[in-house]
Image (cartoon, rainbow, N blue to C red):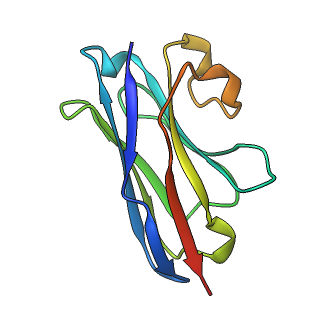
């Protein structure tokens, strides 16, 4: 079992950058595939990026491809989301999810993730 905790959100102007972190407790962090999702008011939680257990495979939503980079450091039990060239439409609460399901690596559906953090707010102004 892992408990993700997100950090690194904030207020940034369009074109700026932020790096989100998701620190997960537990001794078996490397057994979990991880994903980042975001949710705006009145909208469903949407997939942003995901990474496999070792970090060797990454997956992105089309809307962030080329701007965001997901990575993980299993020695630190942490997954990162580097966000560059931010746009106002990136404004949302960003959530980190963890899944141990072997078939869920790169999963783009929130339902396949078993554990979630509390979220961190990202606001991009124009």
Q: Position of residue 12 (x, y in %)?
A: 47, 78
Residue closer to the observer: 50 or 94: 94
Q: Is residue 90 above or below residue 48?
A: below
Q: Is residue 107 above or below residue 87?
A: above
The residue at 55%/50% (across/down) is 94
The residue at 54%/12% (across/down) is 102
Residue closer to the observer: 58 or 28: 28
Total numbered labels placed on residues in the image: 0
Q: Position of residue 17 (x, y in %)?
A: 43, 73
Q: Residue furthest bottom?
A: 126
Along the horizontal axis of the image, is 64 left or right of 53? right
Q: Position of residue 55 (x, y in %)?
A: 38, 34
The residue at 37%/19% (across/down) is 2
The residue at 74%/56% (across/down) is 41
Q: Is residue 37 above or below residue 18?
A: above
Which quarter of the rendered picture does the C terminus lie within?
bottom right
Along the horizontal axis of the image, is 44 left or right of 69? right
Q: Position of residue 5 (x, y in %)?
A: 38, 38
Which quarter of the rendered picture does the N terminus lie within?
top left
Q: Residue furthest left?
A: 75
Q: Is residue 40 above or below residue 55?
A: below
Quadrant hosting residue 66? bottom right
């Amino acid at each position: 079992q892992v408990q993700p905790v997100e950090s690194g959100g904030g207020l940034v102007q369009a074109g700026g950058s932020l790096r989100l972190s998701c620190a997960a407790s537990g001794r078996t962090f490397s057994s979990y595939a991880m994903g980042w999702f975001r949710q705006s008011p009145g909208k469903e939680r949407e997939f942003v990026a995901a990474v496999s257990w070792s970090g060797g495979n990454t997956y992105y939503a089309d809307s962030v491809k080329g701007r965001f980079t997901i990575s993980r450091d299993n020695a630190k039990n942490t997954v990162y989301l580097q966000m560059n060239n931010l746009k106002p439409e990136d404004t949302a609460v960003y959530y980190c999810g963890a899944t141990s399901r072997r078939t869920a690596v790169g999963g783009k559906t929130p339902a396949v993730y078993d554990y979630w953090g509390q979220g961190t707010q990202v606001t991009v102004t124009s």
